[in-house]
């Protein structure tokens, strides 16, 4: 049996080709997660959070393999983002952003295994933020989604279109947090070629 790969098994959610907003049905999912606040480009807590998340994810991969004889591919980094006003995103006022960074986990990875992996990772690395990694579940359902290609700071027009045009034109309203899925490694990818999924859970008005 090949390892579980969320990008392959949920291809409609993790491999879109549309650069314009379109609706997709997102199933319930489980994640490991860590929360924070501030500019992801300059705030050291963000870097520590991402490092902690990956430390637990890879420990969890090997913990699950030993305990259940099942394997999975560590998924891409994802993020839920929110602020006091939507304009904080279109104007890129990053110091006001709140974030919850996520990595998907298969349904057969239990909360107990997550806790075991968190403890094991904390013993291996002197990274206190590992203690903040926890389980998280999402059930986003109907969502507007598009693929953004280019620098993160160029997402503003797409988000402005979503908030100012797309939702009203399709009689929709937002029901959850702004969600991004990072398909490219920014350390190895030219900013002009970064691929990021932008997602917003929605429902019909009324």
Image (cartoon, rainbow, N blue to C red):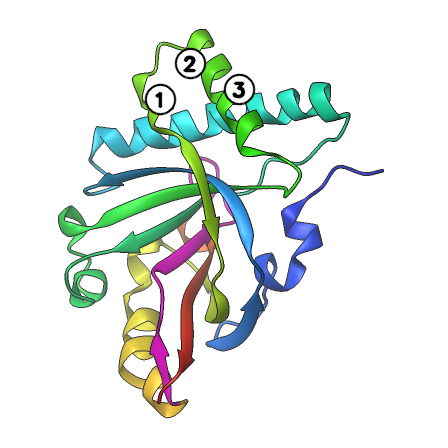
Q: Which mark identifies residue 170?
A: none
**Contact, CB < 8 Å: mark 1 with mark 2?**
yes
Image quadrant where one finds the N terminus: top right
Residue topped by disc 2: 122
Residue occupying the point 66% across, 59% down: 11
**Contact, CB < 8 Å: mark 3 with mark 2?**
no
In the image, residue 26 lies at what x, y percent?
Answer: 55, 64
Residue 200 position (above or below residue 28): below
Residue 145 position (above or below residue 15): below
Q: Which residues are magenta?
A: 171-190
Label 1, label 2: how far apart the Cα atoms are: 7 Å
Residue topped by disc 3: 116
Q: In this image, 45 relative to 194: left or right?
A: left
* Element type at mark 2: helix
In the image, residue 66 lies at what x, y percent?
Answer: 71, 18
Q: In this image, 110 relative to 197: left or right?
A: right
* Element type at mark 3: helix
Residue 73 position (above or below residue 117): below
Q: Which mark identifies residue 131?
A: 1
Counting the numbered discs, the total is 3
In the image, residue 153 lies at what x, y percent?
Answer: 29, 56
Q: Is residue 152 magenta?
A: no
Image quadrant where one finds the C terminus: bottom left
């Amino acid at each position: 049996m090949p390892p579980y790969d969320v990008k392959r098994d949920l291809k409609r959610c993790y491999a879109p080709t549309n650069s314009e907003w379109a609706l997709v049905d997102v199933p319930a999912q489980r994640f490991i997660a860590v929360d924070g606040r501030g500019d992801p480009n300059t705030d050291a807590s963000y870097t520590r959070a991402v490092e902690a998340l990956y430390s637990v994810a890879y420990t969890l991969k090997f913990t699950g393999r030993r305990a259940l004889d099942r394997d999975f591919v560590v998924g891409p980094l994802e993020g839920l983002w929110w602020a006091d006003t939507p304009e904080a995103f279109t104007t890129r006022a990053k110091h006001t952003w709140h974030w919850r960074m996520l990595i998907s986990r298969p349904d057969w990875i239990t909360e107990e295994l997550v806790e075991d992996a968190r403890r094991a990772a904390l013993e291996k690395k002197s990274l206190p933020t590992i203690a903040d990694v926890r389980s998280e579940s999402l059930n986003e359902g109907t969502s507007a989604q598009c693929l953004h290609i280019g620098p993160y700071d160029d997402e503003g027009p797409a988000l402005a279109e979503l908030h100012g045009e797309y939702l009203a034109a399709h009689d929709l309203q937002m029901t959850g947090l702004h969600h991004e899925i990072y398909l490219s490694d920014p350390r190895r990818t030219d900013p002009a070629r970064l691929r990021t999924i932008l997602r917003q859970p929605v429902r019909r008005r009324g």
